Amino acid sequence: MRKLRLPDRTGEMPKLGHQDIKLINDLGMNKIQHQAKKIVSEKLTEAQADPKIPAAGNPVYKGMHACRATSRKELKIAHGIPAEKELSDTNLESVVNLLSRWIAREYNFYKEESEMKQTNINSFSQD
């Protein structure tokens, strides 16, 4: 399995929100990975032009947008995965692994940023 490169974390990239974090906490990462595999299989396995990928509703969708994995064309441009033929099992696993790593990274950033906000709020309280 080829390890695909995570995108840089910039201001305009999708980020996980409260609902995404709640879903991850409720389902657990194993179920999120299972969903990722199902979604990637359904949307990207065949060499189709541009499947409709929602931008919200599941952290997997946000990850697909952030990692440039919403179409076979994007996978080819960003990650060098051929668009002309069906997605191989190895490439499918590489994309799922990429999405899982992105979700885990964003989850950790969300938690860290939430703790920093709380610390900052507390530091300004007047007693």
Image (cartoon, rainbow, N blue to C red):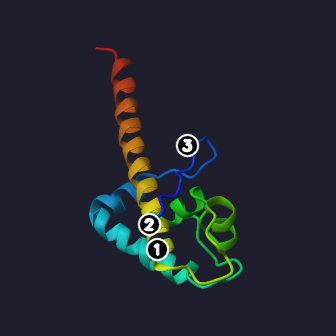
Q: Secondary structure at mark 2?
A: loop
**Disc 3 vs disc 2: Cβ atoms closer than 8 Å?**
no
Quarter-of-image position of residue 113? top left
Q: Which image quadrant: the C terminus?
A: top left
Residue occupying image coordinates x 61% and y 61%: 79
Q: Nearer the viewer, residue 4 or 39?
A: 4
Quarter-of-image position of residue 72? bottom right
C-alpha separation, residue under disc 1 versus residue under disc 2: 5 Å
Q: Say which of marks 3 and 2 sits in front.
A: 2
- Say whether disc 1 or disc 3 marks the residue closer to the N-terminus: 3
Check the image and report above or below for 32 versus 89.
Answer: above
Residue identifier under label 3: 9
The x and y percentages for residue 10 are 60, 41
The x and y percentages for residue 87 are 55, 79
- Please name the amino acid that badge 3 sits on: Arg
Graded by Cα atoms within 10 Å as few (under 14), some (14 to 19) or many (20 or more), the crowding at tag 2 reads: few
- Say whether disc 1 or disc 2 marks the residue closer to the N-terminus: 2
- Please name the amino acid that badge 2 sits on: Met
Q: Secondary structure at mark 1?
A: helix
The x and y percentages for residue 80 are 64, 64
Outermost residue on the front side: it is 1
C-alpha separation, residue under disc 3 versus residue under disc 2: 24 Å
Graded by Cα atoms within 10 Å as few (under 14), some (14 to 19) or many (20 or more), the crowding at tag 3 reads: few
Residue occupying image coordinates x 41% and y 44%: 110
Residue identifier under label 1: 90
Residue identifier under label 2: 1
Check the image and report above or below for 11 versus 102.
Answer: above
Q: Secondary structure at mark 3?
A: loop
C-alpha separation, residue under disc 1 versus residue under disc 3: 26 Å
Give the numbered dot on residue 73.
Answer: none
